Image: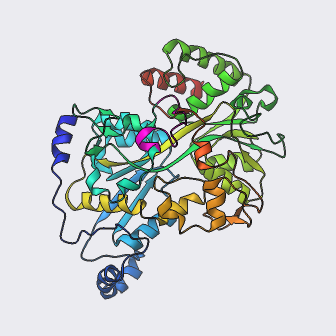
Amino acid sequence: MKHSQIRSASSTTSEPSSTTENTSDAIAISTSRRRFITQPARTCAAVAIASKAPYVFARNPIKLRVLGTHVTLQEELRQQAMKDLGFEITFEPKGSAAVLQKASMYPESFDLYEQWSNSINVLWNSGSIKGIQKERIEHWNEINPLTKTGRITPHAKIGAGDAPHKILHVQSDGSLGPKISPQVSFLPYVHNVDSFGYNTAVIPKGEAYKTESWGWLLDEQHRGKVAVVNAPTIGLFDMALAAQAQGLMRFNDIGNMSDNELDTLFALLDEKKQQGHFNGFWTSVPESVKFMKSGRVVIESMFSPAVASLNGQNIPVAYAAPKEGYRGWHGVMCLSSATTGRQEDAAYEYMNWWLSGWPGAFIARQGYYISNAERSRELLSPDEWDYWYAGKATASALKGTDGKVSVQPGNIRSGGSYETRFSHVAVWNSVMPSYDYSLQKWYEFISS
C-alpha cells in the first residue's frame, strides 16, 4: 500500500461505534462505566468462568491484537487493560527482529504494534502502519518535549541517529519528519536509555559517567564472558560504541555509518568472535537474565527490566552509565494500516489507556519512563518517584513489577535523574541509510 493511499484512508476518521467511550482521566474506570461494563458481564459470568476470559464484554465483542516484544507485552498490563477497557486483548510477544519482520510483511496480522523508534522507517516505508490522529489522543498536550523536540531540557544534546522527533510527524508529501502536522507515525509512550549490565561480584563497580565505558564489552579481560543483544539496529550500536571507546576505530557519524565503516567494524568483531570473545547473543529479556544468572556471562548488553529482575534475585548486577553516553530508545505504538472501524476505535482506547496513569506507574517499577509522567506520579510512592525519576536515594526498599525487592534503601539510580540520563544520549536506535548492508553484515557476523 502506498502512503498516499494510507493518508487518504486515515485522514477520514472512521465513525466511532455507539459504545466507544473516552478514557481521558481514567486511572480507574468511572462508576457509570463500571456499571456499563459489569452489568452485562454478570449475565454471562458462567461463560466467562468456563472460557477463562474474565473480562467478557458481550455488547462489544472486540479482540484487539497487539504485536510487540516482551518489554511492554506483559501479562499484568494485558489483564489491567482488559479490566479497565472491557474488551479482549491478545498479546503476541516476539524477539525484536521477528516482530519487525512480521509487522512489515503482514499488517493484517495485528491492530497495534509496539516496539522501538528504529522500526518506524521500515514499517512506514512498507505501508504496514498508518498515521495516528493526534486529536484522538486525549493527553497529547501532556507529552513532554523529549519526543516533540528531541531534548528533555533546552540544553540537552539530542544524540546521533533517529531522535524520535525526526520521525514523529506525517509530512504533507507522505514522508516522516519534525514539522508539526495533525498526524503522527507513533504514539509516544515508554522510553529509556540503554547500556550494559555487569556482575559487580566479578567486575569492580565503576563510577557513572567517569569510568564506566562501552569499551568494557570488548575488553580482553572479559573474553568468553560477554553477550550482545541479537538485534541489528540495537546490537550494532552497542558494538560500534564499544569499538570507538576502545580506540579501535572512529566514526564520522555513529548514527549514520558508511559501508566502509561497517566493513571495518565487522572485521574487528569477526576477529573477536573467532577468538572466543562472545559467549552468546540474546533475543529477549528473559534470555539475557538467564545468561547472567547462570554465570554464562559477566557483562552484556542489557535492558532495564533484566537488571531489575536480577537484582530482585540478589544477583549484584550494575547498569552502567557510560562516559561516552547512552544508547537511547523510544517506544512506539503504531496503528496497522489494515485496522479500521470498531477495531480502530478499540486501538485508540488502548493507546489512550497507556497514557492514563496506571501503565506509566507500572513500567516505572522496572526502570522505564512514560511520556506524560506527572499523570503517573500520584500512583507512585514518594520513594518510588525519587528513585526512578528524580535521581534521589530511596529511604525504603522498592519492589519491581514481579513483587520482589529490586532496590535497597539508600540506593540511587544509576545515571541519576530522568533529565540527567536523557542529557547523555550518544546515539538513538536507528535505521541508517546503510540499513540493508548493515543487516547483511550483522547476520554474517552472527552466523560465522
The residue range painted magenta reads 146-161
State which quadrant residue 53 falls in: bottom left
Q: Nearer the viewer, residue 263 or 51?
A: 263
Q: Quadrant of residue 197?
A: top right
Residue 299 percent across, percent down from the top left:
73, 39
Q: Residue placed at 69% from the left, 35% from the top?
A: 322
Can you see residue 75? no
Q: Which residue is at the far top?
A: 260
Q: Is residue 150 magenta?
A: yes
Locate residue 169 relative to residue 388 in the image: left or right. Answer: left
Please name the residue shown 46% across and 20% down the image. Answer: 437
In screen coordinates, is 237 left or right of 106? right
Name the main secondary structure of what is drawn in magenta: loop
Rendered position, 329 above or below 335:
above
Front-most of residues 424 and 6:
424
Counting from the top left corner in percent of width and height, residue 17 is at 18, 67
Residue at left offset 29%, top offset 41%: 128
